Amino acid sequence: MIDLSNIHVTFGKGTPLQKEALKGVNLTIEEGSFVTVIGSNGAGKSTLLGVLAGDVMASEGKVMIGKTDVTRKSTSARAGLVARVFQDPLTGSCGSLSIEENLALAARRGERRGLRSALGPRRRELFRDRISELNLGLENRMKDRMDLLSGGQRQAVSLVMSTLSGSEVLLLDEHTAALDPGMAEFIMKLTQRFVSERKLTTLMVTHSMRQALDFGHRTIMLHGGEIILDVSGDSRKDLQVEDLIAMFRKMRGETLDDDALLIG
Amino acid sequence: MLSQIAFWGAVELGLVFAFVAIGVFLAFRVLDFPDLTVDGSFPLGAAVAAVLITVGINPWLAAAAAMVAGAGAGMVTAFLNVRFRILNLLASILTMIALFSVNLRVMGKPNVALINADTMLSPFFGLGLREVYVRPLFVGVLVVIAVIAVWRFLESDAGLAMRATGANPRMSRAQGIDTGWQVYLGLALSNAMVALGGALFAQTNGFADVTSGVGTIVVGLAAVIIGETLFGARGILLALIGCVVGSILYRIAIQVALSTDALGLKASDLNLVTAVLVAVALVLPRLRRGASS
């Protein structure tokens, strides 16, 4: 479960460039719920994700993940609760380590890392099994360096990494944006499967309205650091991409000059 | 060419500096932290070991104390970098400069002689093998132990966290790795290795000198680069073996260069020869890549 109450984030406080990225955001996501987040550039999507991941500290408000107050916890200190897949495939894994070493890193997320060999026979077998589920043939390349893989393959491995250790929350940061359409579709299907199989509480930021409506149980739209739309259930089922844009216009009472970005 | 004694002397020195190479490998390659602290922690290790041995402390304990001192020096650099965000290179230069004074304090004078003192090697001299062989053999055994220990560490969960920190800090934090702590740990380990090299240097050469640290970093880097040129990037164990082989080859190359009369080089040309060797080792892989493409 995620519970954000009255989250304010201000960058460059007291300078001429002061920017309020989030203005009192309240958001509760029930356990096992899959929420998609949309919004134009600068709407506060990345900041919202950063507040949950620990990269951005809220200047005001409280962040709860499960039963833990993580408001002041650093990224590494809360990593046991939060799994994350980045937009850039190069960020989510270590290029100079092998596939199985990357998986070994992820398997100990949020746990003590001792002096036991990172890749014992039992773990190797587990990793092989998990990677073979991808049907990408990567199970025969477990000792290959990560940077020999394509962006899509790396993102697929990142998804497996994010589900290796039991965490409360999965954060997806436009994780298909850097991929070609075919690969993006494959990764989304995989995401869908992992999320429903493991009943993960998921927050997915996306640039694509299509994706935002096709996946998950609930869609929220951010604008100017506030949640301006929050739909779920039947009202969401009937929603079309065009409706979203119209609704967006109505609620803000202003014209959008970046429709192209929103439709993406 | 080289006489037997000169050859085994070079091997011995290469093995002593293999510890430096392993330390430099940990900082530069594993953590991606250009750490010049080693120019200070090498003579620190020599100084601590020599002073403790002269007051009658067991030489093994003295070497252990040298490692602790080296680890402390690495921690200081890590502290400056992690806590105060001082640029890594600059943080290590500050520690290095400070250590020059510290080393003089530790010894109380610019050098300490260990001529008649019992060292780690003393018990092995009376066993019938000639001294020229005993020394490299003894240091070699220690190097093998160090290589295996560091290799097993880097392939453990804890070591993997350190390698990830150097390769991708953002991802490491997202995986729950406290990257600041890894810098402390890595630099402590690295400088402990270098200080152990210093302690062995003092014991095999019979003295500790405050100026013996100058250029340690270049020598260590030379060994790492020669090793990489020979073995390529094929796993941790080979990289560590590369450090050792690189260190030995470097010393033999230096010895050959200095003892070949035709070249007309003097001992004082050592630093120039080293710099040229490192430059060549750096350029060679690039030339090879250029030729193949």
Image (tube, coloured by chain):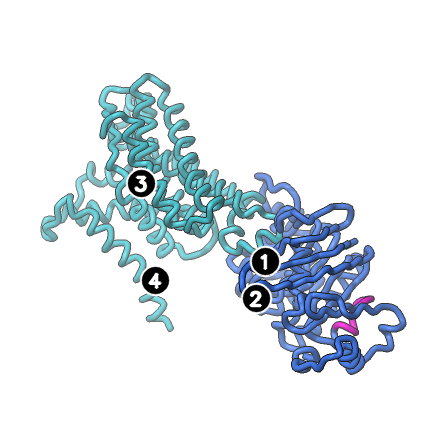
**Residue B119 falls in which quadrant of the image?**
top left
From the viewer's perspective, is A233 left or right of B60? right
Q: Amino acid at mark 3?
A: Ile
Tell me which residue sits at (78%, 59%) in the image: A27
Q: Position of residue A171 (x, y in %)?
A: 70, 60
Tell me the CA gap for discs 3 and 2.
44 Å
**Residue contact at pointers 1 and 3, CB within 8 angstroms:** no
Nearest the viewer among B126 and A9 is: A9
Nearest the viewer among A40 and B116 is: A40
Nearest the viewer among A141 and B80 is: B80
Give the position of the C terminus of chain A as an image quadrant: bottom right
Task: Please give the residue where the numbered disc 2 appears in the rendered image.
Answer: A149
Instruction: Give the magenta-colored segment's residue range.
Output: A212-218
Q: Position of residue A101 (x, y in %)?
A: 58, 53
Q: Earlier in the sequence, mark 3 or mark 4?
A: 3
Q: Colour of chain A?
A: blue
Tell me which chain appears cyan.
B
**Residue contact at pointers 2 and 1, CB within 8 angstroms:** yes
To which chain does the residue with label 3 belong?
A: B
